[in-house]
Image (cartoon, rainbow, N blue to C red):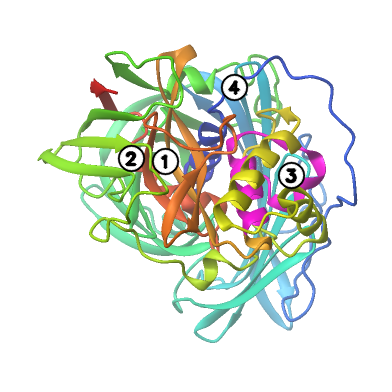
Amino acid sequence: MRNHFKVTLFVLAAVLAGCQPTAAPPAIKPVTGPLVRPAPVTGPITSPTVEPSGPSVQPVNHETASSGEREVWSVFYMQDQRVGFSHVVTRPVQDGGRTLLHTHGQSELTLNREGSVLTQRIELQTWETPEGKLERFQSRRTSGPGEIVTQGKRLGAMMLVATESLGKRETKPVPFAENCGGYFAAEQSLERSPLKAGESRTVPSLVPVIDQQGEIILTALGEEEVSIRGLTQQLMKVKSDIKIAGQTLTTFCWIDSRGQTLKTFDPSFKQEAYKTTREFALAKEDLGKIDLLAVTTVPLTGKLRDVRPLFEATYVAKLKGDKIANHFANDEFQQVTKVDDHTVRLTIAELDRLSPVNRERLSEPPTPEDSAPNSLVQSDDAAIVRLANSLAGDRTEPFQVALALAKGTRAHISKRTYAQAFATAAEVVRTQEGDCTEHAVLLAALCRARKIPARVVLGLVYYPPQKGFAYHMWNEVWVGNRWFPLDATVVQGTVGADHIKLRHASLHGESAYAVMLPLLQVVGRLELEVVEVE
């Protein structure tokens, strides 16, 4: 369950990044400026740190393993193509005179986007009481040149959570339920007490990658025959509804009579995971061959003109199997009209910054978070401040400054690659590489460095090679008492009717992956038709 949610969010990041055409990747350009792996977070949050060992994770030496230690290897597939593995070791440890259960998991996911290979790694650790109460946790996520390290320590009814990336650290207390478990709480709950057919159970747990509290509702659907690598077994099928930040992801797992999870399935991207041997999990044949961009682009019925910018267009959007309400933004740029529970009409027009502000459709004004630096948008980073001042020159009018920064972002990111899924602004300003997510976080940081409120937008953009809409990220800046869209991946910098907006975010206090949760409701189920173009 937590394996699939973790992989799903990684895939979402990869889907979002793969939204612009690119040539075959050139040689890696040397990093300029200081770009180093952050040390484990120090200060009030302390815990034993296990250094990640990269893709070739070594198994536990069972000859010296302590009593109660358990090791599990799993292999990941997406649409029948191998995409990665996970390795989890659980052991009892002594901590201040008490016994805690320490679980250490490492996963690696390899995806292909039009010839560019993306490898993402995550290391998860939890320390829990024998009853399953979370005391401490640590996650370390790697995608591209940098790392994001998050640690948490329980303080009564709160969890003190610190996140660090390239020296930028955010620490905040977060309410946490007394009975909340760690990343692996659902699996451990099933092992402690396997469900019987018809039974249901709610497990509060820490959600991996997002590092927020959620809950998992487990429901045993009944036994069925399941084939795993040619071996047929009678296993209990369990439905798992993972609820986090107002979103729900439904996955399925199959457990044996001891409650051990042998197989999981996530319908979002047709992902499967199987318990297996170390040798099979680490095998490299057929790894990362699936073209993620090709399988996630939303097909478009009808034709769009090749001329850009596209000034105005009307689309009909349908969502298969779910209500479509509130999935699309409704503002000055994009008007949404309900057709039925599953269908809306989208009227989108390039925004004229000199036109009167439409107060009825105006989005909410900036919050302090739209102007503040954070662990993803490091607008106070010295390199970002220097670049912002250099690109803006002697301009003072906010829109002209923002437009210059958008065009300057495109010029600064000289290597357009899919080799990372969601780098931070401080990483991008130094590596000068990335795709739409990297353009968006860098432009947001540059604008904030020049005192212009800025946020990122998640949505779709027309992608001619696939004749459909690919998931995309761009920006909105607050100029002239309105939010104005800018896209640093396009030459003109401004946004036309070939962009469809889903939501926006400041990225303050949010995991980059948490921002993408709403995409789970539309990926693989959205249909688009263009009915009018101007």
Q: Mark 1 points at which residue?
A: 256
CA–CA distance in space, label 3 to label 4 = 19 Å
CA–CA distance in space, label 1 to label 3 = 46 Å
Question: Which of disc 4 and disc 1 is earlier in sequence?
Answer: 4
Which SS class for mark 4?
strand
Q: How crowded is mark 4: few (under 14 residues within 10 Å), some or many (20 or more)?
A: many
**Amino acid bearing label 4:** Arg
Of the 4 image quadrants, the one containing the C terminus is top left
**Amino acid bearing label 3:** Val
Measuring from the top left, give residue 372's x and y in whole percent.
Answer: 61, 68
Pointers 3 and 2 in contact (C-beta within 8 Å): no
**Which residue is drawn at the image coordinates 68% and 41% (left, top)?**
409
Q: Name the residue under label 2.
A: 236
Which SS class for mark 2?
strand
| Range drawn in magenta | 422-447
Q: Which is closer to the viewer, label 1 or label 4?
A: 4
CA–CA distance in space, label 3 to label 2 = 46 Å
Q: Which is closer to the viewer, label 2 or label 4?
A: 4
Q: Name the residue under label 4.
A: 113
Question: Which numbered tag is attached to residue 428?
Answer: 3
**Which residue is drawn at the image coordinates 72% and 34% (left, top)?**
411
Q: Residues within 10 Å of mark 2 (few under 14, many from 20)?
A: many
